[in-house]
Image: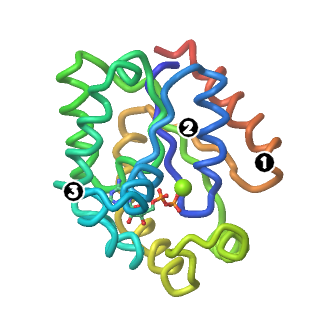
Amino acid sequence: MKRMLIIGPPGSGKGTQAERLSASLGVAPISTGYIFRANVRDRTPLGVAAAAYLDNGDLVPDEITNAMVRSRLGEDDAREGFLLDGYPRTVAQVEELDDILAGHGQELDLVLQLSAGDEELVRRLLGRAKDAGRSDDTEKVIRHRLALYHGQTEAVLTRYAERGQLVRVDGFGAVDTVSERVLRATTLTSGRR
Ligand SMILES: Nc1ncnc2c1ncn2[C@@H]1O[C@H](COP(=O)(O)OP(=O)(O)O)[C@@H](O)[C@H]1O
Ligand SMILES: [Mg+2]
């Protein structure tokens, strides 16, 4: 398993699981949300362009996001393997990723879908807002991010399911329990291709 995606609604635990899984597989963890937030914090030109979208829970426009991911996947560590968290979120981004990987002569090994119910997600995100204070963790913005997930990102899952690359993991339960499910899903499918 060298090239993987993790896809799930906000609050599903993608970030936490992606960190653990990339460490155990020894691949580069790439989180588009993390990269955007770091750029907003440092007031880089990318951060300045993206800030308002993040605060409102909107998707950053594809031209900006695609260019960022293309450049990140071109770096040496990512050429050896990666776990992408937060991308692709739209069908246009799926096509961009196809093009980037084709340019490197690479293919995806697996797409992990982390699932959880909406009310559990809202509960977790409001809890996180109290601890970590992300500017997009108000209930209004959370519900908007969830709506975008259902409206746009679910079509991404359909694409990968049609290609036989999608594996679904239940994200409900303790972090360690979910990590075990994630690890099992990657090892069970590793003989497939
Ligand atoms: N692939 C992407 N396309 C467009 N915008 C993105 C993408 N990834 C991240 N973002 C922006 O960064 C924000 C936070 O992303 P992320 O940390 O992945 O959220 P979560 O893990 O809570 O779903 C998104 O609401 C969006 O504004
Ligand atoms: Mg996240």
In this rendering, the answer to whether 33 lies above or below 74 is below
Q: Nearer the viewer, residue 54 or 99?
A: 54
Distance CA(mark 3)–CA(mark 1): 31 Å
Ligand 2, image quadrant it occupies: bottom right
Q: Position of residue 181 (x, y in %)?
A: 73, 37
Q: Nearer the viewer, residue 183 or 133?
A: 133
Q: Dot 3 corresponds to which residue?
A: 62
Q: Position of residue 124 (x, y in %)?
A: 70, 69
| Pointer 2 local density, CA inside 10 Å: few below 14, some 14–19, many at least 20 | some
Q: Dot 1 corresponds to which residue?
A: 175
Q: Mark 2 falls on what kind of element?
A: strand
Sequence-wise first label, 3 or 2: 3
Circle 3 or circle 2, nearest the eye: 3
Q: Do the CB atoms of the residues marked 3 and 2 lie less than 8 Å apart?
A: no
Distance CA(mark 1)–CA(mark 2): 18 Å
- Amino acid carrying label 3: it is Asp
| Pointer 1 local density, CA inside 10 Å: few below 14, some 14–19, many at least 20 | few
Distance CA(mark 3)–CA(mark 2): 25 Å
Residue at 24%, 35% (x, y): give it: 71
- Amino acid carrying label 1: it is Val
- Amino acid carrying label 2: it is Val
Left or right: where 50 falls relative to 193: left
Sequence-wise first label, 1 or 2: 2
Q: Mark 3 falls on what kind of element?
A: helix
Q: Do the CB atoms of the residues marked 3 and 1 lie less than 8 Å apart?
A: no
In this rendering, the answer to whether 39 lies above or below 187 is below
Q: Which mark is residue 167?
A: 2
Residue at 21%, 41% (x, y): give it: 96
Sequence-wise first label, 3 or 1: 3
Q: Which mark is residue 166?
A: none
